[in-house]
Amino acid sequence: MATASDLRWHGVAALLVVTCTSVLVWFGNGLNPWWPLLWGAPLPVLLFAARSSWGGTALVAAASWFIGSLDMWHYFQVLHAPPFVWAIIYSLATGVFTGAVLLFRALLRQGAWVSAWLAFPAAYVSGEYMASLLTSGGTAGSLAYTQLDFLPFLQLASITGPAGLSFLLLLFSATIAISLHLSRKEPAVARRILGGGLGIIVLALIFGALRLAGPTSHQRIKVGLIASDEPANVDVADVGAATGQLLRDYAREAEKLAARGAKIIVLPEKLGVTVDPDTAGDDTLLQALVDRTGVTIVVGLIHVSPTAKHNQARVYAPRTPVLSYDKQHMLPPFESKFEPGTALTLLSVASGTQGVTICKDMDFTSLPRCYGQAGAGMLLVPAWDFNLDRWGHGHIAVMRGVEDGFSVVRAAKQGYLTVSDDRGRILGEIRSDAAPFTTLLTKVPTGHHATVYLWLGDWFAWLAMAIFLSTCARVFWGRSAAAQ
């Protein structure tokens, strides 16, 4: 029977674990993560789980993850989301983490060392993947995005997509926890698991280093990006004069970039409102500019037709009919009034094939992969962020380029003007808050590179789900055998 002293020390240990993990999650996850921290964030909880009761483990795991997630509370206030929305999202994430820890503990208690080692990351990745399929947020909450600055590791996305990064990230903590747990009673097993876990991660990093050192497209073109965060220019809801004047102001900036050699210029999302039949007048302004300068311009507008409203990107190319792309993934509730699009928009020019998406579309893996399968060497992305998430949300698009083999040109209001290549390297970036206009001009590779992820899609996520289900079955069989 545990003494009062034992219970006291157990409580102190639980408090230390919750404090340590929640701090690591707070600073290692979220909108501005410091990527090394999340590698070790689950480790204190897993070590505690190996020696604690079922109830104590559940309480410590849940408290650690939930408290660490509180750093996102302010962001949801900025989005004007009701508090219960944050509570539901992070309660579910906490539940997934807690369930993964409990599965790890159950297998550890049964002596199923390898199953426990794989079960923890597989369970969490399975929950993460199902959330990406079933919620409006897509992959936005994935732990993989904490590693966007860790370029050698980021290259794994070209094989596995986000699931592989999240899996190895969590596998590291499971490897260390089991190795320490077995170091005295099963040293040989501990060494094998340590060698296996670290070996897999080292191989992933070697692959990443080689991919970063490999050749990229030699064909490059100059692209320009423009944004204005002037208060009067951020949310232009007025039809007619306000939108028309702003388009003329942007057109003057675009002409300057064209004179400096820009071949493609990307403007932000929802720059203004255009209503049929007056849309033809706005089109005439920009079409005259591109015909005169030879530049291609992509501009985000709210397009109101007699039958629907669309969050639209309109594409103006020299002596070519205007193309349009309708955003497919909306941000609720702000964009619930818009009709989602269903089609790709591709430009075939001398420099290669380019695709067009809008902001939140890049939070999902399937749509950009369709562009990769169509051979796009560059995605042009009008966007609109919320200042606070300029890094956290603005850089999600970078991973899509790594996964599917194209460069990304993303121009956001209240965010960054960002250009990245198919290895996730930032080729140019600047905050959009310079007055009255922020501009960026840089050279971008235009060639498309095929990837394993492009061919096989979410194969690794399904593999993780298979591992998760098999380890759950292992727990059930182990208990059944023990009962007999």
Image (spheres, rainbow, N blue to C red):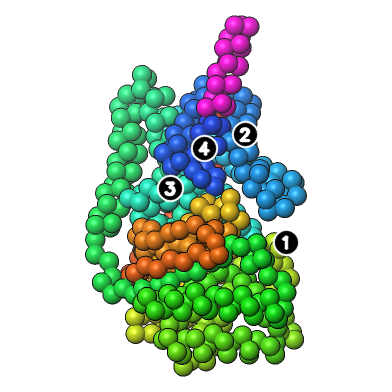
| Mark 3 in CB contact with mark 1 (< 8 angstroms) | no
Residue picked out by circle 4: 27
Residue picked out by circle 3: 147
Q: Nearer the viewer, residue 184 or 206?
A: 206
Kindly identify the amino acid type of the residue bearing the numbered disc 4: Phe
Of callouts 3 and 2, which one flags the residue occurring earlier in the amino acid sequence?
2
In the image, the segment drawn in magenta is 1-20
Mark 4, Cα crowd under 10 Å, few <14 / some 14-19 / many 20+, is many
Of callouts 3 and 1, which one flags the residue occurring earlier in the amino acid sequence?
3
Of callouts 2 and 4, which one flags the residue occurring earlier in the amino acid sequence?
4
| Residue 368 pos. (x, y %) | 48, 69
Residue 285 seen from this side:
yes
Kindly identify the amino acid type of the residue bearing the numbered disc 2: Ile
- Numbered mark located on residue 8 in the image: none
Which residue does the image show at 30% across and 47% down from the upper left? 205
Q: CA distance from mark 2 to mark 4?
A: 12 Å
Q: CA distance from mark 1 to mark 2?
A: 26 Å
Kindly identify the amino acid type of the residue bearing the numbered disc 3: Gln
